[in-house]
Amino acid sequence: MQNDFGGQRVLILGAARQGLALARYLVQHGGRVTLNDRTPADKMANAMASLKDISESVRWVMGSHPVELLNDADLVCVSGGVPLATPIVVEAQARGIPLSNDSQIFLEVTPCQVIGITGSAGKTTTTSLVGKIAVERVTESVKLQASRRVYVGGNIGLPLIARVDEMVPEDIAIMELSSFQLEIMNRSPQIAAVLNVTPNHLDRHETMAAYVAAKRRILEYQGVEDVAVLGRDDPGAWGMAGMVMGGLVSFGFGGLESGVGTYIRGNDVLYAGDDSEVWIMDISSVQLRGEHNMQNVLAACAIAAAAGIPPAAMRAGVSGFTGVMHRLEFVRRWGGADWYNDSIATAPERTIAAIRSFEEPIILLAGGRDKDLPWGDFAALVSHRVDHLVLFGEAAEKIGLAMGNYPYTRCANLKEAVQAAVHLVEPGDVVLLSPGGTSFDEFKDFEERGECFKQLVMSL
């Protein structure tokens, strides 16, 4: 697709972050845009105001997804929050109207190298880490008069389509890609990483096979000149090795039997190239807690190596990285205990990883909205590793049933859960918000939930 949408009639489903950024881009490139969201217009004032300067070029249809909008649509762009099972999307496919989204269009028009990162867990931290490493490389390159700008976005931060017009071939874009974005995409980034694939979002994808198929699409459209980065320790990711079209770089804790990739030996993070072994860093320089974050570091270094970034930049980027908000984020010490915000944990497996990051006695706050995921492994770990379990939100009953006879405190919402923890806490404890469910029963997203938790804790 050319960077010219002159005269094209584009229907965008979903007027959140991705839809708004795409609408602005398309209008600037000649598109005739209809923005459609099922949210009533009186609740969309901020969204509509954000496009006030191009309001004459955007038609808004709010409150539902009327199928009649397809009658004059040449292209339908589906935001990540809109399921493909939505009747208007099903009808668009039946009529043969092409589907796309902001990430797909970005890959079609960007002039620069793109690193795409997906996985069931760890993709936000890994994407942020790779961005930090790439910035360190740029800082080093300035001295050599070979600067490259670094853009980080996609499923996190600003949609990259919002900045594509300022990109040049020498730049590098690092994008997090979710299964919701990938499931309709037919283009892959030059460097594509799959960190892990474990049960997640089964309320949306319905089957594990459909979820895996969505993740695989990040690799499906690569060519022989491209590079795939896969986690060796995860069967879901490593099972995709057979479909790699170009180069393959792997990462994992154990040593490499063949190929190239990152690993740990003793206290060292190492990279094995085609004919040499390169020391990257001592693990003591990693400031992130938990085995899962060590996997993220190994992944970030493998991705950086695939992009030709030297070990010095990897060391500088990793050693200066203390994490991102809402991911095992230290909030404060109160009542003699350390309080942590891990609101990003929207699946049981993420909560399991968070629990394993601590040796101290844990008061765990879990719940939210379930995604039709299994809670058996969560229950097994909690029953022998967590001192007090506080459940809140819509998923509380389902999690409680999985816990069997293990005692827990049940609360209606996050505020009550924090107050319950206040009465349970003892010096030396860790109070951990790591829900295992989504935030949509009480909040608009995990970030709002995390901010609420931090405010509640800071007000103690």
Image (cartoon, helix red, strand yellow):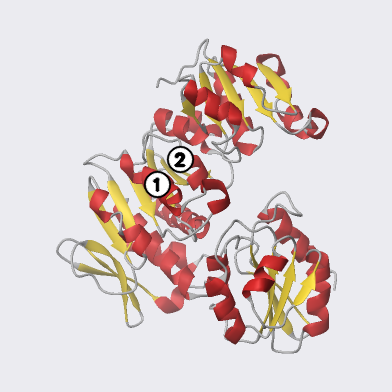
Give the residue type that dot 2 points to: Glu
Give the residue type that dot 1 points to: Ala
Q: Is disc 1 placed on a helix, strand or loop?
A: helix
Q: Residues within 10 Å of mark 2 (few under 14, many from 20)?
A: many
x 23%, y 45%: residue: 245
Q: Which residue appears farthest toward the top when viewing the image?
A: 7
Q: The N terminus lies in which quarter of the figure?
A: top left
Judging by the rendered image, the residue that carries numbered circle 1 is: 213
Residue 407 horizontal/vertical position (percent): 71, 83
Q: Is residue 12 above or below residue 415?
A: above
Left or right of 87 in this view: 457: right
x 38%, y 62%: residue: 299
Judging by the rendered image, the residue that carries numbered circle 2 is: 183
Q: Is residue 152 visible?
A: no
Residue 63 horizontal/vertical position (percent): 75, 29
x 60%, y 37%: residue: 82
> Image quarter for residue 398?
bottom right
Total numbered badges shown on the rendered structure: 2
**Dot 2 or dot 1, earlier in sequence:** 2
Q: Is residue 139 above or below residue 268?
A: above
Depth order, front residue of 356/411: 411
Q: Is residue 305 above or below residue 76?
A: below
Q: Is disc 2 placed on a helix, strand or loop?
A: loop
Determine whether label 2 and label 1 are within 8 Å by CB: yes
Q: Residues within 10 Å of mark 1 (few under 14, many from 20)?
A: some
Q: Is residue 422 visible?
A: yes
